[in-house]
Amino acid sequence: MYDASEIGLNWRGSLEDLFTVPQAKCAFTTPDGRLKEYTGRDRCDFILEETIADNTFGKLVWAKRRVSGPYADYLSKRPSVQGHTKQEAVIQWLCNKSLSEYDLGSHCPQVFDIFNRGTSLWFSMSPVYNAPILDAYVISLPLWGIPREENGIALLKIVAQIAMCCLVLERAIGFNHRDLKPDNILVKTDLVKQHVLKWADFDIIVASSPTAILVDFGFSCLGPGKAPWIQAGDGVLPPLDPCPKVGRDIFMLLVFLLWRRDIRESLTSEHIDFLKSSLHLTRERWSQMMSMRRNPVDWIYMLITERDFQCPALDPYVWLQTCADAYPEVVVMRIHSGSNIVSTS
């Protein structure tokens, strides 16, 4: 059972009960800079400050928040499609909680509050410093623009981290991001470390690298079957899109990466071939819809919301095994066999 009162929402239930989230009451702000619980009890001091972004997807604002002691920095988001704000916030909250159970919470900003401010809905989250989007990170690599081994290894380490997070989230809560473009991945350049997942019957280790962070859950969904338990598709993606689908998120990421000319010009042919080799779709019609010559924005959302869409080679576990076999300097996978541990790299 999950209890969303910790983020200011009057909701408690299982994953199957998530469809009731939109009707739940939430916290609210007052003119004197307070955030109150839905019951009217004081929750914290809360001040909105400087606007960072204001575009078609919503508004992002720096905020100050304190329960006691000094104020601390937070980010607050007001999604443009207000009807899905609670869904987006709850999905991100559940993603952070699920990753944190495996010491991977740094890969997803933590949600702290869902609240009404006047007539609009917002949610607050932990800030992420020194973290350019993936597009900007790769451009900053010393040898970018030249087909060098180092560029491919650096990129594979980021993709492997994302695949590891997708593996946890798909298995734990039935999650698909459904908008896993490079600009929805931040790379925290001052948090360089090994990234380790310890599951019951296997361990995955991604070699030391800056930390990849999933952001912008505005299209995401949870839940298998004919309809998701909850989704934040804001009226753009089909309401009956089953979630998760095999390989969907990593498929999207690789397609968006390989479409970029600067990435193709910065990777060796070996690395490009490795990334392309996983893009095996199970139906000829889907393969015909896919085009590396057109911007993926023009076709990929139609493809990945096809009811039976799947890309088995990009199931996160399968792809991480493949990467460990091909590039043991990027990923090590250890399978627990009884009391023994067998490395696949």
Image: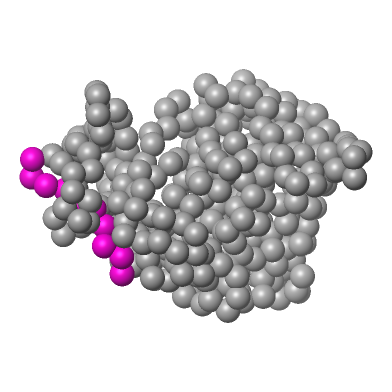
Left or right position of 314 against 212: right
Q: Quadrant of residue 11?
A: bottom left
Q: Is residue 25 magenta?
A: yes
Regarding residue 305, the answer to whether it shows in the image is no
Residue ID at (62%, 20%)? 142
The dominant secondary structure in magenta is: loop
The residue positioned 60% from the left and 70% from the top of the image is 224
Q: State left or right for residue 287 relative to residue 22.
A: right
Q: Examine the rendered structure and indicate whether residue 319 appears above or below residue 19.
A: above
Magenta segment boundaries in residue numbering: 23-32
Whole-percent x, y for residue 345 in the image: 88, 36
- Which of 271/70 is in front? 70
Q: Is residue 207 among the parts visible in the rendering? A: yes
Q: Residue at x 73, y 45 (%)?
A: 199
Image coords of residue 54 (percent x, y): 27, 47
**Residue shown at the point (79%, 53%) measured from the top left:** 318
In the foreground, 236 or 120: 120
Q: Which residue is more in the foreground, 281 or 14?
A: 14
| Residue 198 percent across, percent down from the top left | 72, 39
